[in-house]
Image (cartoon, helix red, strand yellow):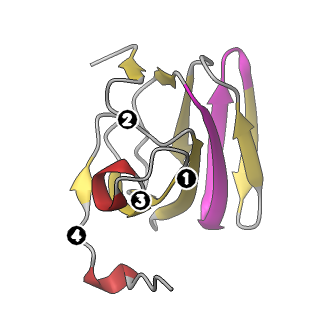
Amino acid sequence: MIVIKINEKEAFRTIDGSEVIEVIGLKSMGMRRLSIAIAKVRGHTRTLKHRHSFLEVYYIEKGKGIMHIEEEERLVCKGDFIVIPEGHLHYIENVEDDDLIIWCICVPAFTFEGTKLEEH
């Protein structure tokens, strides 16, 4: 059995600008098949436009934002799941003062090499 205590993990800033705690993945456990992380997007900020060579799913735990995938945008909020297909340009804007908290699930696991920024 593996029990992971999130409050014992350290956050780091990832290349899209969000603050991330990797719960399960390549960096924390050597897991290649999938990764799960918690991302924080500060109030009235957004992630940088980027794409991945893997499938990504967001689950909004807290807050509201505008999700942009390719040319489509949609208001998202607590309880929503967003499926981001492999290779699709995307970013999320936090439209509130409080932090936007997102669970990020990647299949296969997140890698920096599999992530390409489209802006700096």
Q: Mark 3: which secondary structure?
A: strand
**Quadrant where the C terminus is found in the figure:** top left
Residue lying at the far front in this picture: please name it. Answer: 1
Give the Cα separation between the discs numbered 4 and 1.
16 Å
Residue drawn 45% across and 65% down?
99
Q: Residues within 10 Å of mark 4 (few under 14, many from 20)?
A: few
Q: Earlier in the sequence, mark 3 or mark 4?
A: 4
Relative vertical location of residue 90 with respect to residue 36 in this rendering, above or below: above
Closer to us: mark 2 or mark 3? 2
Q: Earlier in the sequence, mark 2 or mark 1?
A: 1
Give the Cα separation between the discs numbered 2 and 3.
18 Å
Relative vertical location of residue 54 with respect to residue 12 in this rendering, above or below: above
72 lies left or right of 118: right
Amino acid type of the residue tagged 3 in the rendering:
Lys
Q: Is residue 57 magenta?
A: yes
- Image quarter for residue 46? top left
Write down the region rendered in magenta: 54-72
Q: Mark 2: which secondary structure?
A: loop
Residue carrying label 3: 40
Give the Cα separation between the discs numbered 3 and 4.
13 Å
Residue drawn 22% across and 69% down?
10
Residue carrying label 2: 111
Give the Cα separation between the discs numbered 2 and 4.
18 Å
Magenta stretch mostly in which secondary structure? Answer: strand
89 lies left or right of 4: right
